């Protein structure tokens, strides 16, 4: 689907999930079965991005995650180690080495 068509669909249906359902019913566009879940996970990632909290020395969401929300973040363990080393000065990104 091109950009113009996608914009028309969003203007028509006003909701990304309704656009996906309409595309599935139309049958002209191939959409993976787990697309809605992956889209929801992406929106949660942007809405509740992880920031480093220097008081607790670990990453935490910038905005609180609503109760009952399931959020799969497969990269959190890598991110927490990376951010911890970077924020504490152990890892220098410009020199690409551990100090």
Image (cartoon, rainbow, N blue to C red):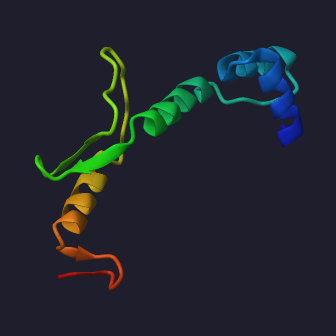
The vertical placement of 4 against 28, above or below, is below
Residue at point 45% right, 34% down? 47
- What is the residue that sits farthest to the bottom in this orientation? 95
Q: Position of residue 36 (x, y in %)?
A: 59, 24
Which quadrant would residue 13 be assigned to in this image? Answer: top right
Q: Which quadrant: the N terminus? A: top right
The number of discs equals 0
State which quadrant residue 91 falls in.
Answer: bottom left
Which residue is rendered at x = 24% and y = 53% of the image? 80
Residue 63 horizontal/vertical position (percent): 34, 32
Vertical order, 25 against 71 (above or below): above
67 vs 20, left or right, is left
| Whether residue 2 can be seen here | no
Using the image, determine if residue 51 lies above or below residue 25. below
Q: Quadrant of the C terminus?
A: bottom left
Residue 8 or 38: which is nearer the viewer? 8
Q: Position of residue 18 (x, y in %)?
A: 71, 15
Residue 11 is situated, as x and y percent measured from the top left of the image, at 81, 23
Residue beneath the point at 18% across and 49% down: 58
**Position above or below: 5 against 27:** below
Left or right of residue 4, residue 70 in this image: left
Residue 42 visible (yes or no): yes
In the drawing, does residue 15 fall left or right of residue 96?
A: right
Residue drawn at the location 17% of the way across and 74% of the way down: 90
């Amino acid at each position: 689907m091109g950009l113009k068509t996608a914009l028309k669909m969003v203007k028509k249906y006003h909701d990304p999930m309704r656009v996906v359902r309409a595309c599935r019913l139309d049958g002209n566009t191939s959409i993976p079965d787990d697309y809605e879940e992956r889209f929801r996970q992406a929106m949660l990632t942007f809405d509740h991005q992880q920031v480093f909290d220097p008081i607790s020395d670990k990453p935490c969401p910038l905005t609180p995650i609503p109760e009952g929300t399931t959020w799969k973040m497969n990269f959190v363990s890598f991110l927490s180690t990376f951010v911890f080393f970077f924020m504490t000065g152990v890892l220098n990104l410009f020199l690409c080495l551990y100090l």
